[in-house]
Image: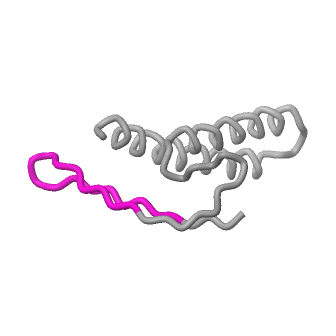
Amino acid sequence: MVCSFSWNVSLQDGGRVEYVKSFIMKYTWNVDPLDPTTILRLISELEGADYILGCLDETEDEIKFISQMKTKYYKLYFKMNKIWEQQ
């Protein structure tokens, strides 16, 4: 799958949200990078990986890495969802 996209979100004067999106994508497996549900699906997979790693011995580094990824994508999801609801 070829997937490239970017989100630029910034608050301007008066709280106005400037929203710029650009993407090039070949759709495969029903993945839309502009839909917050896609990010939510990724978060779900990361949560599952975090749970399984917690059941294994000596995976502290991996758990830390997955937790950082979850934090990043939770923030992205909430930004995307806010914009999605405003449309």
Image check: 1 left or right of 82? Answer: right
Q: Is residue 53 above or below residue 11?
A: above
Residue at figure coordinates x 55%, y 38% from the top left: 37
Depth check: give the residue in front, 79 or 5.
5
Residue at figure coordinates x 63%, y 49% from the top left: 31
Query: In which quadrant will I find the C terminus?
Result: top left
Structure colour scheme = one colour
Image check: 59 left or right of 81? Answer: right
Depth check: give the residue in front, 39 or 61.
39
Query: In which quadrant will I find the N terminus?
Result: bottom right
Depth check: give the residue in front, 42 or 30.
30
Q: Is residue 10 above or below residue 73?
A: below
- Residue 17 place in picture, x, y as percent: 23, 50
Q: Which residues are magenta?
A: 5-21
Image check: 87 left or right of 16? Answer: right
Specify the principal SS of the magenta part.
strand
Image check: 85 left or right of 77? Answer: left
- Residue 36 place in picture, x, y as percent: 50, 41
Q: Is residue 21 above or below residue 77?
A: below
Please tell me in which quadrant of the rendered image residue 44 appears.
Answer: top right
Give the total of numbered labels: 0
- Residue 66 place in picture, x, y as percent: 69, 47
Please tell me in which quadrant of the rendered image residue 45 appears.
Answer: top right
Residue at figure coordinates x 34%, y 43% from the top left: 83
Is residue 26 covered in magenta?
Answer: no
